Amino acid sequence: MPLVSLILPILSAVAPSLVKAVAGDDENAQVISRTVRDVVAEVTGVAVTTAEERDEALRRIREDAELRAELKLRLADIALRETEALLADRADARRRDVELTRVTGRVNDRATNMLIAAFAAVAVITVALIVLNFYVSAENDRYIGAVIGFLTGVGGMFARNIGTAFDFEFGSSRGSQIKSSQIEALSAQIARAPEAPLEAFRRRLAAY
């Protein structure tokens, strides 16, 4: 069973803020998934390599309040570090653009051209989808449907890229406020963690 399928039910129960971080297929999502599994295994004492082990880990999490609090604390720390890394990465990219403009007097034409291309691709795909709908018939329904599905997926990818570009350019407003609120909430969650699980966690760290 894929690792994500094993840990998603656990994250949904105790750390929903991490669900999006492990849902992708990039290397960072895989690293976070493995880290989450290791933490769950350490806290619950269950390896979480099969569906049965996952269910056993969930049972222990639900039945043991102290164990559940410790796991929430550990996973909140992972979510906090991931959010901080995302903000730092975006800040570095903005700093690079500012430095490029300062030194050379030029703007980042590559980023601008990529954004224009993404807008153009979404527009072309939208027109293509509209046109294809006029050609759907009983004879070619399966073929046209497959093409429409493919174009819809590609169009969604470009639309997400546009959204990411806007987040990059205007992240100092609502986007950064949301991320800052998430960091504050996660930090507060760690600060409010019960004393007993926190001390148990510290003792485990000291024992390594």
Image: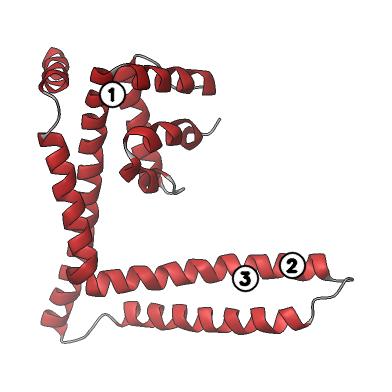
Q: Residue at point 48% right, 71% down? A: 158
Tell me where residue 187 appears, x and y as whole percent: 13, 42
Q: Residue at point 34% right, 78% down? A: 110
Q: Which mark is residue 106?
A: none
Answer above or below: position of 103 versus 64: below
Q: Residues within 10 Å of mark 3 (few under 14, many from 20)?
A: some
Task: Identify residue for label 1.
Answer: 68
83 on left or right of 110: left
Task: Identify residue for label 2.
Answer: 145
Quadrant hosting residue 199: top left
Task: Identify residue for label 3.
Answer: 151
Given the image, on which type of amino acid does mark 2 rest? Gly
Give the foreground label among 2 and 3: 2
Under tag 3, what secondary structure? helix
Give the CA separation, mark 1 to mark 2. 46 Å
Tell me where residue 78 appears, x and y as whole percent: 24, 38
